[in-house]
Image (cartoon, rainbow, N blue to C red):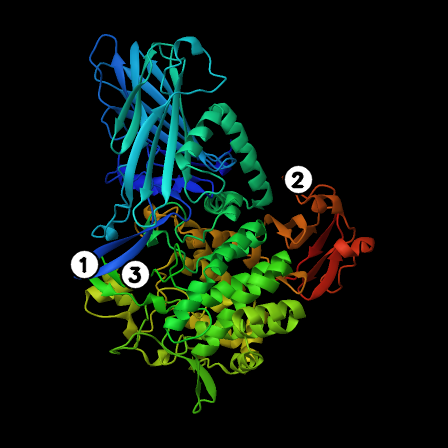
Amino acid sequence: MTQAWTWSYEGYDPEKERLREALCTLGNGYFATRGAATETPVGPSHYPGTYAAGCYNRLTSTVAGRQVENEDMVNLPNWLPLRYRMCPADAEPGPWLSPDHPQLVEYRQSLDLRGATLTRRAVYADPAGRRLDVEQRRLVHMGDPHLAALHTSFTPEGWSGAVEVESGIDGDVRNTGVVRYADLANLHLTAWDTGAEPDDRDDRQDRDDRDDRDDTVWLRCRTSESEIGVALAARTVAAPAPPEAPRTRLTDRGAYQVLTLPVGPGAGVVVEKTVALYTSRDPAIGSPVRAALGAVRRAPDFTGLLASHHRAWEHLWRQARLEVPGEPGRILRLHLFHVLQTLSPHTAELDVGVPARGLHGEAYRGHVFWDELFVLPFLNLHFPEVSRALIGYRHRRLPAACEAAREAGRSGAMYPWQSAGDGREETQELHLNPHSGRWLPDNSRLQHHVGSAVAYNVWQYCQASGDTEFLHTKGAETLLQIARFWASRAEWDGSLGRYRIRGVVGPDEYHDAYPDAETPGLDDNAYTNVTAAWVLARAGELHRALPDTCRGWVCDQIQLAPEEVERWDDIAHRLHVPYHRGVISQFAGYGELAELDWEGYRKRYGDIRRLDRILEAEGDTPNRYQASKQADVLMLGYLFSPAELAGVFRQLGHVLDDDVWRTTVDHYLARTSHGSTLSALVHAWVLARVRRDDAWAYCEEALIGDVADIQGGTTEEGIHLGAMAGTLDFVQRGLTGLETRDDALWLSPATLPQLSKFGVRIRYRHHWDVDLSLRAQSLRIAVPDGSEGARGGPGAAGGAPKGTRDAGSRGGRRGGARDAGADDVRDAVRVVLDGRSFTIAPGTARRLDLPDT
């Protein structure tokens, strides 16, 4: 195993343990478990959370004298517990051991990214010099999404006797992983029941004298309001098998087995714990507890589980190949690892969205925000079936979005800023400022631009996948309803001769109202208006392009009248975009706000990423200043290529040339505190094409955002999934300029010196393994042969796809590349590189020189 594929921590550091737990989380898209030590309960240094995708529950809390509801992703019963102690033959049993115990003398944990296992090694020594070496390997199975397992070996040094092991399931858990939520209701589980069952596997040896052993314990419960049934079963066996049967200990909220295992010098013991988790949301089951018991009984031993687990991950790594040299490549592999653990092919079978903090912790309560905007562009080109499922989550909640619009006096679909189970608005009404201790009104539900993100994802998925069936049905229904909402939000202003969208909040969450205003909201947020114009234009384009039958069905489904579409076109060309001093204004009136003393605040506070909290604690507000939490206007440069963005502004009657965009970038670059991990990513993306020399600093910050926890204690509450996926997409699309539109791959590379050599594999339409390799100012594109694409399966694990051959000549800077394999033009991939159009036939590759940058 090479260092490039491992993530290791030497020594035990209680202050950093929760951060390590988040970064060492193991999952499979169905459920995930934090990398907590199995010997330790919840405490200041430990939080052993397990979360199943889409498993939410609602509780009511009293906050600042008000009753508020919150829906949370539920922390499920903890399957990890496995503790142990030394029982020397010549002494009393020792204490239960854990990394927090003073007898710990060595500690190391290592995350194997390629094999998706977590290995922990601890060595303990008691006052008499007896040593116990404990090595534990953990997996959450990627092949069977309901299974997980622990393999623990105990090796004594200098003593004989026994190791006592207690293994079980702890159902006495709460959602207490975020300190800011400490005053909120947190007990989501109820109706616990526990039991034990004999292991009746046909292949068990020595059945004659151990038929009555209870080798498997189980626990079932349900969530208190959503009434989701949850069941776990755990089988614990030892090798060599102990002479005494395990002792079963059942409590109201837990089920445990205690094993006494003889050991001696040169005679260690291995304990294997296999766990199954099911919920009542799973298809094709009756009782979750029966399903869990059956899965545990059928599961092979750890060796067998590990082999099939590795095979499943091998397929994933092949489909999502991303080769970047050096330390950036190692961090990108970690990011890809966590993206795949949260959103795997298993996700395609679930009704779930993109949890902003993964399945790694309880920050943001596991809610679905707009972060899919940073995740789906990567998945579209590797796992489009997962993208389709995630967009399906939004379509299934279209009725709730339409109801929200009606309640707000609008038409169409108003998607919530925070979504969870049923699609209603889950954004909290109050939020806590830890700096001041005050609960404050939360107006972020006015971020209606989330609807544009949903529409953008529908469009981009269909462009990348060619899935016209989805586009002409569910996609069209979703996109047209979002366009209808924007049309209902647009108000005509005769004095401007423009439409305006008032009372919203943009991506920059520092500004939620005008200074001293009694009501929240801002007018004509540039990002909101430009993306709304884009949605309206795409909706009109799609409406005209739909086949007659599909158009009739969709229009009948949503009762869309032709005159509505005509108005969309008018709004799409006349929405207001404010400017000040030659800069695109973040919102109307932004240029009139005061300038902040940035240098003074940095001197006083050092880290001012959360400037909003600092100002509020001082009795001030960022609403008074030209100061942004994160990229807002500049987000337009992330969503759209320079040519497409200029086209949208031209549609709105504005000229967006390089000078205007550079001036705009410089203005906000000097006035952004980067209080979100997404901000550095967007700035790196934009600066790579505007100020390349400055881009790497932001790229590096985006890479280490979670690894170094630069937000100061937030990563331990859950990784930032959008930022992680965004760094992958920064290489895949940002540096290559890759777009999928008009039935072609459009490329316009703009690399950084620190990332000038890399390779990516994408899935484009029916071609599974299109390889893009950038080396020394040249780009090689390889397309798999027809048989490979026709099978619909992955190709070779590295290098060019199986069966490809070089097409011959290299394309020059001035001349266009000649067509390769014209006889196969029907299955060829059309590529447009910096304005040069050519095709690459199946089974061939092409190397093209890039213009100087």
Q: Nearer the viewer, mark 2 or mark 3?
A: 3
**Quadrant assignment, res 192:** top left
Pointer 1 or 3: first along the chain: 3
Crowding at label 3, few (<14), some or many (≥20) Cα neighbours within 10 Å? some
Mark seen at residue 437:
1
Q: Which residue is mark 2?
A: 796
Crowding at label 1, few (<14), some or many (≥20) Cα neighbours within 10 Å? few
Q: Quadrant of the C terminus?
A: bottom right
Give, as a three-letter code, the residue at label 1: Gly
Residue 242: image x %, image y %? 36, 12
Q: Secondary structure at mark 1?
A: loop
- Cα–Cα gap, marks 2 and 1: 56 Å
Query: Which residue is rendered at x = 73% and y = 52% of the image?
Result: 846
Looking at the rendered structure, the number of numbered marks drawn on it comes to 3
365 relative to 682, above or below: above
Horizontal placement of 404 versus 814: left or right? left
Query: Which residue is rendered at x = 22% and y = 70% of the image?
Result: 620
Which one is in front, 302 or 775? Answer: 302
Query: Which residue is rendered at x = 29% and y = 73% of the image?
Result: 623
Residue contact between numbered discs 2 and 1, judged by CB atoms under 8 Å: no
Mark seen at residue 428:
3
